[in-house]
Image: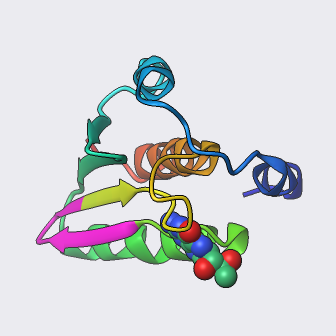
């Protein structure tokens, strides 16, 4: 992530987003679903090495903004789940993370 996006992510408010607001924001996130108070999506890669490379790359991006998704690798599929633990629900950081994960996965040829 570039320095500007990184700074912007830090500046985002960390207040919990309501269910209605979350459903609204979800419209802009194709492929993602609300599961309880979390955002969830599965990506499918060409194979296991690409799936692992994705979680490593997303892992470093997540560490850089101090906001960490749950990551599950299942052969060539990776399930990414975002919620804000400290708030017990969704915040803007989760939506920013979901967008970041999506663009990274797409550049790596995921479906
Ligand atoms: N990630 C997520 N998903 N939710 C959090 O509340 C959170 C995090 N908190 N990463 C961060 C780390 C916090 O523990 C540190 C101390 O900033």
Q: Quadrant of ligand 1?
A: bottom right
Q: Is residue 72 magenta?
A: yes
Q: Position of residue 16 (x, y in %)?
A: 57, 44
User: In terms of depth relative to the viewer, which is nearer, 9 or 44?
Assistant: 9
Q: Is residue 54 magenta?
A: no
Q: Is residue 17 above or below residue 104?
A: above
Locate the N terminus by quadrant.
bottom right
User: In terms of depth relative to the viewer, which is nearer, 73 or 82?
Assistant: 82
Who's the residue at 54% across and 41% down the image? 95
Residue 2 image-quadrant placement? bottom right
Q: Position of residue 9 (x, y in %)?
A: 75, 51
Give the magenta part as a residue range: 70-78
Who's the residue at 42% across and 56% down the image? 82
Q: Is residue 76 above or below residue 60?
A: above
User: In terms of depth relative to the viewer, which is nearer, 19 or 59?
Assistant: 19
Q: What is the chief secondary structure element of the magenta stretch?
A: strand
Who's the residue at 16% across and 64% down the image? 76
Q: Position of residue 74 (x, y in %)?
A: 12, 70
Q: Is residue 85 above or below residue 103?
A: below
Locate the C terminus by quadrant.
top left
């Amino acid at each position: 992530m570039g320095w500007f996006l990184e700074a912007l992510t830090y500046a985002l408010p960390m207040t919990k987003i309501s269910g209605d607001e979350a459903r609204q924001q979800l419209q802009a996130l194709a492929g993602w679903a609300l599961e309880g108070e979390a955002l969830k999506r599965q990506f499918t890669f060409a194979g296991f090495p690409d799936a692992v490379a994705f979680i490593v790359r997303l892992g470093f991006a997540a560490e850089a903004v101090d906001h960490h998704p749950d990551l599950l690798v299942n052969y060539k599929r990776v399930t990414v789940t975002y919620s804000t633990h400290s708030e017990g629900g969704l915040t803007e950081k989760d939506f920013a993370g979901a967008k970041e994960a999506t663009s990274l996965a797409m550049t790596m040829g995921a479906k």
